[in-house]
Image (tube, coloured by chain):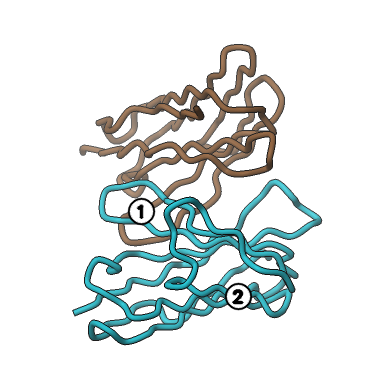
Amino acid sequence: GAVVSQHPSWVICKSGTSVKIECRSLDFQATTMFWYRQFPKQSLMLMATSNEGSKATYEQGVEKDKFLINHASLTLSTLTVTSAHPEDSSFYICSARTSGRAYEQYFGPGTRLTVT
Amino acid sequence: GQNIDQPTEMTATEGAIVQINCTYQTSGFNGLFWYQQHAGEAPTFLSYNVLDGLEEKGRFSSFLSRSKGYSYLLLKELQMKDSASYLCAVIDSNYQLIWGAGTKLIIKP
């Protein structure tokens, strides 16, 4: 149990375009979802926390108008990278937490974004 | 500020035992996680400690001392597939996960 999927697993886009990444909890209801970014050889960096039905809470330094997060249901959250630039190229990982197991996060497989 | 320290890289031999240490200074404590992350993949859950002591799970064990702000992950009977980064993360008083930078473990034959 506790499976989280992400789609797409990798994407290449041109500079200036927007990319949407989906994160789904497949067999549980995710009251909270987290979006992370990870650059090569670095640790995870939390970008934002989203609770179902409410606005996401962004970490300091993360532009909320650039990284749009929507958590419309208990099983789906989306991250849209708007007007992507090459420096946005990174590994984006979502994780989900259910209220029943408040301390454990389940990670999706990640999405590798390359902006050319 | 909040801080989690773990060694950057460790090397061990196949079949041996290795201990990866993690020390933390956080505003509050609601538990400590260890995750394994292979290159290019998302982290996978290994263990969760909230009480002092040793938790054993197969070849992997995790220890916690809250008074010392210290944890370790012990890997026994090392296999080549254990080559990965091991991430220590602490839940603070706001229930936020604070991540260490990870320890890259290299297993040699």
Q: Is residue A41 left or right of residue B32?
A: left
Q: Say what amino acid the circle numbered 2 marks.
A: Ser
Q: Nearer the viewer, residue A70 or B49?
A: A70
Quarter of the picture containing the C terminus of chain B is top left
> B21 above or below B31?
above
State the image quarter where residue B52 is shown: top right
User: Where A7 sits versus B103, above or below?
Assistant: below
Give coordinates of residue B62: x percent, y percent. 56, 29
Disc 1 to disc 2: CB gap under 8 Å: no
SS at badge 1: loop
* Along the line of sight, the residue nearer the viewer: A15 or B14: A15
Tell me, for residue B38, which label it has, or none.
1
Badge 2 marks a residue whose secondary structure is strand
* Residue in view at x 71 percent, y 25 percent: B51
Q: Residue at x 42, y 50 (%)?
A: A44
Residue positioned 52% across, 66% down in the render: A108
Question: Can you give x and y, in whole percent of width and height, for residue B90 in the image?
Answer: 57, 35
- The hue of chain A in the figure is cyan
In the picture provided, is A3 more to the left or to the right than A13?
right
- Amino acid type, callout 1: His
Eyeballing the image, is B106 above or below A53?
Answer: above
Frontmost residue, A10 versus A73: A73
- Residue sticking out furthest to the right: A100
| Pointer 2 residue | A77
The chain letter for the residue carrying disc 1 is B
Rendered brown, the chain in question is B
Q: Decide which of A97, B38 is in the foreground and name it.
A: A97
